[in-house]
Image: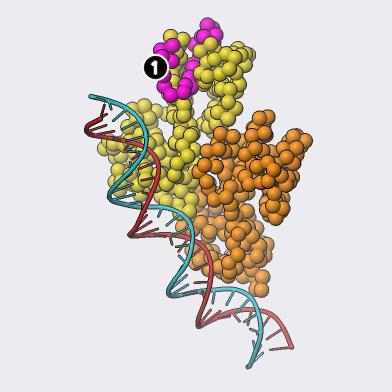
Chain colours: A yellow, B orange, C red, D cyan
DNA sequence: AGTAGTTTTCACAAAATCTACATAGATGTG
DNA sequence: CACATCTATGTAGATTTTGTGAAAACTACT
């Protein structure tokens, strides 16, 4: 299976690296560009870029300009990274044909989810809309969980955490690791907040709750 | 296969030696630097350093500064050694692009495990996720052991100890040696605690327990 | 601003693990 | 075989890690 190419455009190399690492792990081929000109160059040189992740704030040529130049020739899906969702921005963006906004800071997990949703929508997608394991059905699109057919009310974080567990079932996940994918990249609070979420998840999952196992001295793991 | 180069930066030569010894044994080529300036110098002189292990606390130029200077030109993975996980530190470090933290004191075994995990993630990796010997399967990722297909519940130390034995099967291991790799480097307690762990391991391993042999007057050995 | 819902922190209880120690057993030596 | 060493094992206390409930902080929506 060939990997889809995603172009990541941001002037901060740290941010590119963060996004790149996660997308690579999720099965994409990642190209980077550090500024707008480079981005446009790369896009027209590489013929088969499937999607662009584009930061708004950049020196030289900003995200809007890049978007405009690319839209003049291509309908490639574009995801914009913006600081704190700004309605004016969104308006501008939709006129230019931006497909999606993600406010910084985001969690890596969310970014991947949005990318997959768009690629699925535009027919290039690969991954599933629903996950299923041990009677637990996760509908990513509806953001809904059912256990043995019964809908279960989960909060946002609980939902994200549960899907993360299921996507990584059988793997011992340290709190560190969980924070780095489910939480926003700028979260540096107490890792014990995970314990609290696990507690709530377990209780909401009823007797199925015990498939989230504690790995003592390490973290948690979804029983396989 | 050529050995990957790792640069170890710490002002304490004792610490450098500790880390160096272990990494060398694990198949890496180790370069040392005793302070920040030396580190930056060495990094730019040597062209192909695969990873940097960097102490935070150093005279002259501290770890953050080194990190910053190197990040200005390179995305080489950096592991920071910090005193007892300090949240403020992590915030600073994240902005600078640190890949991983290890709190002092650590066990050499853990350090190597993290290094391998990062190199694997960045595609340079080499080592295995699972070990297998005599029906004992060690799944490092799941942090799980099965014996003849049956899962066995081991504590953290027991797990580390068993993998250490299997990684060194057929070699007589003194208690000294075991302490120096499985225990944190600042442990100076009774070496006889190993006996207790061996006892528990043997009992949890059932009839397979006897492949951990006592080497009288010396230590232990996993029967080959 | 007020409210409901969510997320995070905190403090203490509970559990699991680790270590030290005492004693019993095993091994090697002359 | 007696003695000195070293190892096995059970127990209990110390330490570390996790579970839990409640309070505080934060969000989103009126």
Judging depth in this view, the residue of C16 and D12 nearest the camera is D12
Residue located at (66% from left, 30% from top): B72
Residue depicted at x 66% and y 73%: B217
Q: Is residue A60 visible?
A: yes
For label 1, the residue is A87
Q: Tell me if residue A186 comes above or below residue A58 in the rendering.
A: below
Q: Position of residue A223 (x, y in %)?
A: 42, 47
Left or right side of B155 for D22 = left
Residue D20's x, y, as percent? 31, 52
Q: Is residue B11 left or right of residue B195?
A: right
Residue A70 part of the magenta-drawn span: yes
Q: Characterize the local packing of mark 1: few (<14), some (14-19) or many (20 or more) Cα atoms within 10 angstroms.
A: few
Region rendered in magenta: A68-92
> Helix, strand, or loop for circle 1?
helix
Report the front residue among B83 and B161. B83
Q: Using the image, determine if residue C11 lies above or below residue B114.
A: below
Name the residue nearer the viewer: D9 or B130. D9
């Amino acid at each position: 299976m060939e990997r889809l190419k995603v172009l990541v455009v941001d002037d901060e190399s740290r941010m590119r690296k963060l996004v790149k690492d996660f997308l690579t792990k999720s099965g994409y081929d990642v190209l980077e560009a550090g500024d707008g000109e480079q981005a446009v160059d790369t896009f027209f040189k590489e013929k088969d870029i499937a999607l662009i992740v584009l930061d708004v704030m950049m020196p030289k040529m900003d995200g809007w300009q890049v978007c405009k130049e690319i839209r003049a020739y291509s309908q490639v899906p574009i995801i914009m990274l913006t600081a704190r969702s700004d309605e004016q921005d969104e308006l501008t963006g939709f006129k230019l044909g931006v497909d999606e906004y993600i406010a910084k800071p985001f969690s890596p997990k969310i970014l991947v989810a949005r990318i997959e949703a768009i690629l699925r929508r535009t027919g290039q997608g690969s991954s599933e809309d629903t996950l299923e394991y041990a009677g637990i059905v996760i509908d990513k699109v509806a953001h809904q969980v059912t256990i043995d057919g019964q809908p279960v009310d989960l909060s946002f974080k609980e939902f994200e955490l549960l899907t993360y567990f299921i996507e990584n079932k059988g793997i011992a996940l340290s709190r560190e690791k969980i924070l780095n994918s489910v939480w926003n990249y700028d979260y540096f609070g107490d890792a014990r907040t995970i314990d609290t979420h696990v507690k709530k998840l377990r209780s909401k999952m009823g007797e199925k709750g015990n498939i989230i196992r504690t790995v003592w001295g390490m973290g948690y793991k979804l029983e396989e």
